[in-house]
Amino acid sequence: QKEVEQDPGPLSVPEGAIVSLNCTYSNSAFQYFMWYRQYSRKGPELLMYTYSSGNKEDGRFTAQVDKSSKYISLFIRDSQPSDSATYLCAMSGGFNKFYFGSGTKLNVKP
Amino acid sequence: SQTIHQWPATLVQPVGSPLSLECTVEGTSNPNLYWYRQAAGRGLQLLFYSVGIGQISSEVPQNLSASRPQDRQFILSSKKLLLSDSGFYLCAWSDQAGGPIDTQYFGPGTRLTVL
């Protein structure tokens, strides 16, 4: 079983839609949760970072962590064509080792 | 602010040739440094990580090696490239364990094609 599971997509939505991206994990020791956005042929860019359970909002982006279900989500409101990218979830137990999902490719159609 | 550089950005090499990719970090001291490989349409595979000068941990046995000659410099090498070494190589850094946050920051990547 992989440490982190993420649906690879692709996910195609119309502009303005609410997007939900999700990851599940198996290691209950994970406490730090990250979402990265990766444009084609570029390095991943840190989008959101959360510690432990709860929600965190930054503009159109909301990250949710449910440690009891070992489930994390990233919501994008009012999605834009510029949001089209691959989104990677990542997590860590605080010992400098990071575990990544395989990424979900998102396409927002104008 | 911190910045991470990688070069070259793109590289095409014949099978059997040597490889040297370089990564440098600015604006932080004593970072943890990482090399990842990302195959097309796949996730990130951790290759090496380093917690200090000369300290390298290998995650995947292969014909690649890594070195950290200076605090903020990380080098990925190979003596003889294989076709399977093609991919997108990413360098990343994080603060040492025990810092206020535990997350990673990535460089722009090097796209390697082995022919």
Image (cartoon, rainbow, N blue to C red):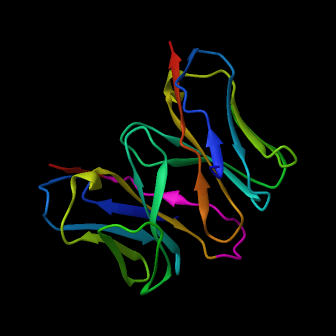
* Residue A14, image quadrant: top right
The one of B67 and B16 positioned closer to us in this rendering:
B16
The one of A62 and B82 positioned closer to us in this rendering:
B82
Identify the main secondary structure in magenta: loop
Residue A93 appears in the rendering: yes
Q: Is residue B65 left or right of residue A66?
A: left
* Residue at image point 44% right, 37% down: A39
Residue B115 covered by magenta stretch: no
Q: Which percent across, then down, holds residue B68?
A: 38, 80
Residue positioned most to the front: A1
Residue A57 appears in the rendering: no
Is residue B51 placed above or below A29 in the rendered structure?
Answer: below
Is residue B48 placed above or below A52 in the rendered structure?
Answer: below
Q: Which percent across, then down, holds residue A65?
A: 79, 45
* Residue at image point 37% right, 74% down: B74
Q: Is residue B88 left or right of residue A107?
A: left
* Residue A95, image quadrant: bottom right
Residue positioned most to the bottom: B54
Q: Is residue A41 left or right of residue A60?
A: left
Is residue B38 placed above or below B60 in the rendered structure?
Answer: above
- Residue bounds of the magenta highlight: B97-110
Residue positioned most to the right: A68
* Residue at image point 13% right, 63% down: B16
Q: Which percent across, then down, holds residue B114?
A: 19, 51
Is residue A18 placed above or below A86 in the rendered structure?
Answer: above
Q: Which percent across, then down, holds residue B48?
A: 44, 70
Counting the numbered discs, the total is: 0
